[in-house]
Image (cartoon, grey):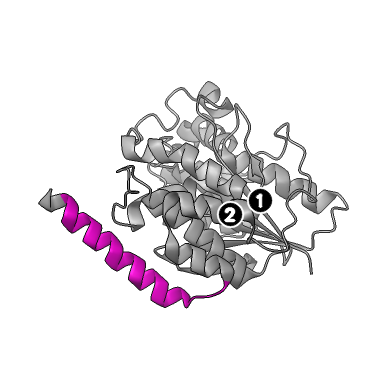
Amino acid sequence: MNKLVLIDGNAMMHRAYHALPPLTDPEGHPVHVVYGFLSMILRLFADLKPTHMTVVFDRPGPTFRNHLFADYQAHRPKMEDDFIGQIALVHDAVTAFGVPIYEQDGFEADDVIGTIVAQVVRKKTGIDQVIIVTGDRDILQLVSDERVCVFMPTKGLSEGKLYGEKEVVERMGVAPPLIIDLKALMGDASDNYPGVTGIGPKTALALLAQFGSVEKIFASLPAVASETVKTKLVNGKESALLGKELATIRNDAPIAFDPETARLASLDSPSARAILERFHFPSLLRRLSGNSDVKSDEKREKKAVNRENEQQQLF
């Protein structure tokens, strides 16, 4: 079976940044995000056994959502300097591993992922299954039958859970297509849009279970039993419709996915070895060649990081 592993690059870089202690190369440059990201790629390749692999990144600058809603993600904290400095290094490392990168100005990585998924599903690409790797629950809306699923880390970068339709319903309370409607009613604090004021998870889930989509709820307002809820919906209709538009992952980003460039028989190559030597990651070199025990090397690397921290404190 041809299997595409599609990695949400920014989500996983942030996870690596917060999951791992600081690590520097011999020149003193921070590299723990690079280490975590490459460690994750090696583990995904070994565990999920993909025939194809791609990484998608956000681009700097505003997207169409910022034009729809000026305060979209406005309260998110500024990225730390030691994180920003590693973004280009992660790009270099991914390219050295032979994994193609997709990104598009004006669109979020989610939309590029959605576009790739749509192209795989609609066209005869030869890919039988897509596994999206991310820590972002918004991506769960793309899950469909057995062809598209999501792998979400549950502990650091080393453990995760695979989400099909059943697992999405268990976690979110609704089927994948209704996640955007749930967000439209409840709002999204992380993306900074309000939804319908006064509508929480319990009420939102009950409304969706009774009527279906946001549009069907507003088309059936007389059937809403609670006058209080009805008033909230009337007052929040514009906000809910805007929220649904903001929550919906687009599938029309102007990119053309080429499955042949994403085909990978092995991660082991001269360029991959060179980049690991450049960053001084001996444990990852051993894992790349298959001459290591993953858990032992991860413990060894953690000890090395701790020793590095102690030396930095001393000097």
Q: Nearer the viewer, mark 1 or mark 2?
A: 2
Q: Which one is nearer the viewer's eye here, 74 or 108?
A: 108
Tags 1 and 2 in contact by the CB under 8 Å rule?
Answer: yes
**Quadrant showing the N terminus:** bottom right
Q: Is residue 20 left or right of residue 239?
A: left
Give residue 272's mark.
Answer: 2
Percent position of residue 30, x then y: 34, 45
Residue 299 sits in quarter: bottom left
Percent position of residue 193, x then y: 43, 35
Quick check: 245 above or below 175? Answer: above
Give residue 98's mark.
Answer: 1
Residue 303 sits in quarter: bottom left
User: For the residue carrying disc 2, how many other residues have a C-alpha within 10 Å: few (<14), some (14-19), or many (20+)?
Assistant: some
Q: Residue 212: tell me if it is visible.
A: no
Amino acid carrying label 2: it is Ala
Quick check: 81 above or below 147? Answer: above
- First in sequence, mark 1 or 2: give its number: 1
Q: Residue 209: tell me if it is visible.
A: yes
Please identify the dominant SS of the magenta region: helix
How many numbered marks does the figure carry? 2
Percent position of residue 66, x then y: 51, 25
User: For the residue carrying disc 1, how many other residues have a C-alpha within 10 Å: few (<14), some (14-19), or many (20+)?
Assistant: many
Look at the image and give the residue range highlighted in magenta.
290-312
Percent position of residue 226, x then y: 45, 49
